[in-house]
Amino acid sequence: MSLFNVFGRWYRRKFSDPDAAMLLILILLTAAVLVFWGGLIMPVMVAAVIAYLLDWPVNRLVNIGVGRTFACSIVMLVFTAITILLLVGLLPTVSRQSVNLIQETPLIWQNAQDWILRLPDKYPDYVQVYQIQQMMEGLNDHLVEIGQHLISASFSSIGNVAAILVYMILVPLMVFFMLKDKHFFLDNISFLLPQERRLITQVGHEMNTQIANYIRGKVIEIIIVGAVSCITFVLMDLRYAILLGVLVGLSVLIPYIGAAVVTIPVAVVALFQWGVSPEFWYLMVAYGIIQALDGNLLVPLLFSEAVSLHPLYIIIAVLFFGGLWGFWGVFFAIPLATLVKAVITAWSGSPGDIYTDEMNTK
């Protein structure tokens, strides 16, 4: 019975304040909408992400006297032109290198098998032939399963062509209207919120700044890391340099985990091309320098205003939200973790604590 009393006192202390109760209800309703209808509203979420990214240049143009509608039109035209140039410049090269790498994967795997099978001869005291055979059989079975999944995924993705067309038409329109009529939509959202919204407003203002800074910083980080990696790999004459550079750039979306995962294809391709040679180690040193500069220089500069989170909390957030919402869960893992921290902070400082203490004193 004492456990229920403890829980009851905690509940009254934290939710005796109507503002705290309204914040909890809003979070539960938002989570339910994302869980059950997240796929349907995904174009709206994508448009909101791009609108967050483009809101900064629009505001800069408005501050120097340009009309908001004209500023939105200029920013949208520049953004569309840059996107098309990147797609035209990168997509054919990345596609071609991806096909070549897939075609050479069996040869790479065969060379890896030959090297593994020579291990018992080199280290007879540590590696036995039957161990190698068992390991190779297990790996081959897993590779067959992965190949089947990739083939089925490629066929299922054909049906997504219509969805891509929808994104190409509807998302830019939604982005334009979100930028142009930003204050109109904010007023409508404010009108729908309950009057007991002190904590909702507090958390909302904090998260609005956090998300805007995070999206802008993450896009800049992807571009810088990807461009530097592509240039480095090309100068060192690494095969599939553009493809691997793009992968390194995209890997920053997943903190810690992404850098560890993308190291595997970079190392495998370099090892297949040069073997264990000075060129291989030069490349790995250069790649390590890129990762070190990203983690110790670029990230602190871009995300200096972000709420500091322990690396363990970030990894847990990536795994949890990525499991719930896939790519976008991974992309927003840090802002969502920051949201959880902001909500906990808001509840911890809830006036309900003061109210409860006063009632206990009386």
Image (cartoon, helix red, strand yellow):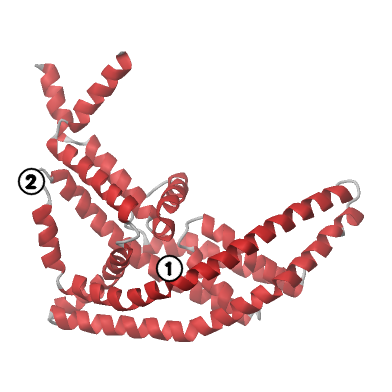
Q: Which residue is mark 2?
A: 195
- In the image, residue 315 above or below residue 237: above
284 or 8, nearer to the observer: 8
Q: Amino acid at mark 2?
A: Gln
Task: State the mark number for residue 221.
Answer: 1
Q: Amino acid at mark 1?
A: Glu
10 or 43, nearer to the observer: 43
What percent of the width, then of the height, locates residue 259? 54, 60
Q: Secondary structure at mark 2?
A: loop
Task: State the mark number for residue 290.
Answer: none
The quadrant of the image that shows the C terminus is top left
Residue 64 visible in image: no
299 or 268, nearer to the observer: 268
Count of picture labels: 2
What percent of the width, then of the height, locates residue 27? 25, 45
Q: Say if mark 1 contacts mark 2, CB within 8 Å.
A: no
What percent of the width, then of the height, locates residue 18? 13, 36
User: Who's the residue at 31% across and 13% down the image?
Assistant: 1
| Label 2 Cα crowd, 10 Å radius (few <14 / some 14-19 / many 20+) | few
User: Who's the residue at 25% across and 59% down the image?
Assistant: 209
User: Who's the residue at 15% across and 23% down the image?
Assistant: 357
Q: Quadrant of residue 109?
A: bottom right
Could you tell whether 154 is left or right of 132 in the image? left
- Which label sits in the foreground, 1 or 2? 2
Q: Earlier in the sequence, mark 1 or mark 2?
A: 2
- In the image, residue 337 above or below residue 298: above
Could you tell whether 22 is left or right of 306 in the image? left
